[in-house]
Image (spheres, rainbow, N blue to C red):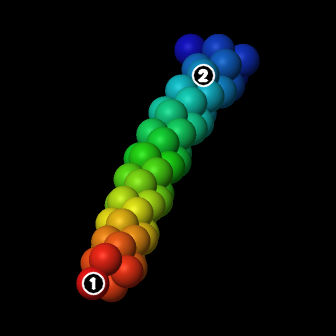
Amino acid sequence: MDNSNNASYQAGQAKGQAQEKGSQLMEKAGNAAQSAKESAQEVGHQAQAKAQGAVDAVKDAVSK
């Protein structure tokens, strides 16, 4: 293999590795986004349940 072929080969290898790292980072970012979304939904559900409990407590107090 002469020098220009070797340089092209190494450039191709580097490009492949960079693409692989990029896809791994995108996957990690996607997983982090999904986790954040699930956490936000859980917080929302907890807040909704607390609000409903407060409404029920007020209704109960008013009806007595």
Q: Quadrant of residue 15?
A: top right
- First in sequence, mark 1 or 2: give its number: 2
Which residue type carries mark 2? Gly
Q: Are marks 1 and 2 in contact (CB under 8 Å)?
A: no
Is the residue marked by circle 2 packed among few (<14), some (14-19), or many (20+) residues within 10 Å?
few
Please give the label number shown on residue 12.
2
Task: Kindly state the secondary structure of the residue where label 2 is placed.
Answer: helix
Q: 32 left or right of 5?
A: left
Observer-nearest residue: 38 or 22?
38
Q: Where's residue 45, x and y in %?
A: 36, 60
Residue 35 in the image: above or below residue 43: above
Observer-nearest residue: 63 or 12?
63
Task: Kindly state the secondary structure of the residue where label 1 is placed.
Answer: loop
Q: Where's residue 13, x and y in %?
A: 54, 28
Instruction: Report the Cα–Cα distance between label 1 and label 2.
Output: 78 Å
Residue 22 in the image: above or below residue 59: above
Please give the label number shown on residue 64.
1
Q: Quadrant of residue 9?
A: top right
Residue 5 appears in view: yes
Observer-nearest residue: 12 or 64?
64
Which residue type carries mark 1? Lys
Figure quadrant of the C terminus: bottom left
Q: Residue at x 43, y 47 (%)?
A: 34
